């Protein structure tokens, strides 16, 4: 910030010395905005739910895993619906398969005890369109 | 040293019998030259799907979790031994997960396609397959003569 202000001041100062207050052609005028500043309109960095709260996904945590499962078919929702980053989605899918294989989690349905859990995402509004 | 997790679904039986089952399964680990770090009871409940084991169909099981270390070469034998135990309905051995750190890439993934890193890589990969173009080496960015 201070450096920027100093730069502008220096430019104005030197332009006066060089031109002697006479309008002459110069490659760089003092009106040129400074583009070396960082983008003030840059959006805040978005993080997925699991990364944001730093949640460890484990195959024994069936209550968490079942939130990524469809109550109608028991299948795992895709990352365009869950809104997870690629890595987290991969981990969640692996852990769900492990839990189902170990007999902790249902495969063709979501277990009725988890049906009233709060929803982490809206299935009807995927962040990217469905492929069908 | 790899720490393993063994998740066992046992037949739901009265307590004294359960004690002998757990002793038997724990001794199997000790016999292989391993040791147990943790034994956790995850409760007795209805299974999410019924399972047929040793000719009987079960829909209720006691869940137990062992955390243990054994030489990796004896994991197969251990798994096989538990498979022959008629009190065990289902068993799975997994490696214990270690916490890994990584950057969340969601922000990059939500960008329009040309700005995404993986799409840019794909384009660069496709450019490699382009036919080689003849270079005139004239120092001009256009062809100076009539074609």
Image: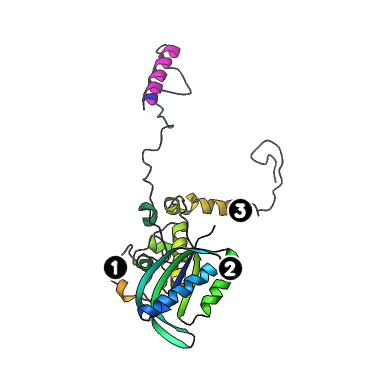
Does B56 sit left or right of B124 as displayed?
Answer: left
- Residue underneath mark 1: A117
Mark 1, chain letter? A
Way the structure is coloured: rainbow
Do the CB atoms of the residues marked 1 and 3 lie less than 8 Å apart?
Answer: no
- Classify A37 as above or below B75: above
Specify whether disc 1 shares its chain with disc 3.
Answer: no
Q: Give the mark nearest the N terminus, 2 or 3.
A: 2
Mark 2, chain letter? B
Specify whether disc 2 shares its chain with disc 3.
Answer: yes
Percent position of residue B10, x then y: 42, 78
Q: Main secondary structure of the magenta part?
A: helix
Tell me what residue is drawn at x 39 percent, y 22 percent. Answer: A8
Q: Residue furthest bottom?
A: B55
Tell me what residue is drawn at x 36 percent, y 52 percent. Answer: A52
Mark number for residue B103?
none
| Residue span colored magenta | A4-20
Looking at the picture, tell me which residue is in the foreground, B50 or A93.
Answer: B50
Percent position of residue B85, x then y: 50, 80
**Disc 2/disc 3 C-alpha distance (Å):** 45 Å
Tell me what residue is drawn at x 49 percent, y 85 percent. Answer: B54
Element under disc 1: loop
Does B1 sit left or right of A7 as displayed?
Answer: right
- Residue underneath mark 3: B125
* Residue A95, quarter of picture: bottom left
Mark number for residue B74?
2
Percent position of residue A21, x then y: 39, 13
């Amino acid at each position: 910030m201070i450096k920027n202000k100093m730069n502008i001041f220096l430019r104005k100062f030197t332009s006066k010395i060089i031109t002697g207050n006479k309008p002459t052609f110069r490659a760089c005028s003092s009106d040129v905005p400074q583009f070396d500043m960082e983008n003030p309109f840059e959006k805040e960095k978005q993080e997925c739910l699991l990364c944001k709260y730093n949640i460890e996904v484990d195959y024994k945590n069936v209550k968490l895993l079942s939130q990524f499962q469809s109550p109608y078919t028991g299948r795992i929702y895709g990352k365009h619906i869950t809104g997870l980053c690629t890595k987290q989605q991969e981990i969640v899918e692996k852990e769900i398969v492990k839990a189902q294989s170990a007999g902790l989690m249902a495969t063709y349905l979501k277990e009725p005890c988890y049906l009233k859990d709060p929803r982490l995402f809206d299935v009807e509004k995927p962040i990217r369109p469905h492929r069908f | 040293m790899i720490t393993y997790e063994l998740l066992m679904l046992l037949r739901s039986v009265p307590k004294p019998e359960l004690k002998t089952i757990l002793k038997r399964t724990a001794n199997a680990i000790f016999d292989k030259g391993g040791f147990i770090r943790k034994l956790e009871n995850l409760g007795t409940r209805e299974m999410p799907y019924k399972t047929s084991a040793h000719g009987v169909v079960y829909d209720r099981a006691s869940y137990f979790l062992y955390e243990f270390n054994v030489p990796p070469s004896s994991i197969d034998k251990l798994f096989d031994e538990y498979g022959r135990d008629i009190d065990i309905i289902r068993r799975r051995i997994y490696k214990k997960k270690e916490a890994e750190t990584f950057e969340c890439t969601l922000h990059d993934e939500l960008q329009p396609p040309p700005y995404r890193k993986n799409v840019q890589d794909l384009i660069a990969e496709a450019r490699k397959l382009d036919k080689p173009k003849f270079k005139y080496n004239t120092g001009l960015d256009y062809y100076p003569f009539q074609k």
